[in-house]
Amino acid sequence: GIVFDGKKISEDKKKEINVAVKVIDKRRKVYNVEMFQNEIRAMHRLKNDNIIRSYALIEMNRLIMIFMDLAEEGDLLTLLLRNGALRESGSQQYFQQIISGLNYMHEVCSMAHLDTKCDNILLQKGTAKLSDFGFTSEFCPIYAAGNLQTKRVGTFEYNPPQLMYDNPRYFPPKVDVYSAGITLFIMVFGRFLFVSVQKNFEKKQKYIRDQQLSYLKAIDAKLSDRYSSEL
């Protein structure tokens, strides 16, 4: 959907609060009922300092409007495109906040985001917050073969190798951790971990499946260790 700036009246009706209004046109081909339902489910259940808060939903004939926190500083991707890679201290701060939001989803709500990426990390007063819950899925917290999921989710460049197969099987929280690790790498280096020149989708899948992790020499040893542990 398209996002606009808006205002809402505070609960005590004494002041106006700046909010973002996400407008979804149900007539557009990109409108997906299941993803919209995931957004609504997340809106009602997720209440955390590192997750964008949604306040209300209004549905009209062809439009859906979701009122949520306004992230005055934009998203993480825009920040990186404008300023380049972040300092390691800044990357670590944002990464800890991202992990805090994901941990809340996993441990408290038994929900996985499944599309963690720079575009979906919003910045509000110096705090990183998860947003865009269209791929969000509930899961059984017990890791077992019967609890693995098979639906394709997320964004290709952020997905783990398990999702690069024709019939993927994965444990949702692990997808989030991997995607968060890719996000950390992008913050530190200003580029994707794996970059394929292949245009064919299947060849790109194989390229990523076959890669081994390596680190640039400039990376701090401790950060390298932290990154490895997340993956």
Image (cartoon, rainbow, N blue to C red):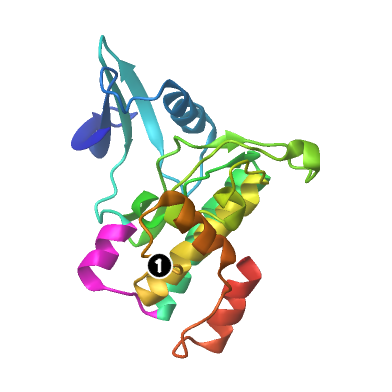
Q: Which segment did they paint magenta?
A: 76-87
Q: Residue at x 34, y 72 (%)?
A: 190
* Residue 61 point in image, percent of width and height: 26, 9
180 up-or-down from 18: above or below: below
Location of residue 202 with respect to 84 vertically, above or below: above
Q: Residue at x 52, y 45 (%)?
A: 114
Q: Quadrant of residue 81?
A: bottom left
Q: Quadrant of the C terminus?
A: bottom right
Q: Residues within 10 Å of mark 1 (few under 14, many from 20)?
A: few
Q: Quadrant of the N terminus?
A: top left
Q: Residue 24 lies in what quarter of the image?
A: top left
**Can residue 22 be seen at all in this image of the molecule?**
yes
Instruction: Please state if 209 lies on the left or on the right of 132 as rendered.
Output: right
Mark 1 residue element: loop
Our reading of the magenta stretch's main secondary structure is helix
Image point 45% across, 63% down: which residue? 183
Question: Residue most toward the top?
Answer: 61
Q: Residue furthest bottom?
A: 217
Q: Which residue is mark 1?
A: 195
Residue 226, percent from left and from top: 60, 75
Magenta-drawn stretch contains 122: no
* Residue 126: % across, % down: 34, 62
Amino acid bearing label 1: Val
- Is 71 on the left-hand or right-hand side of 161? left
Q: Residue at x 56, y 81 (%)?
A: 224
The answer to which image quadrant residue 140 occupies is top right
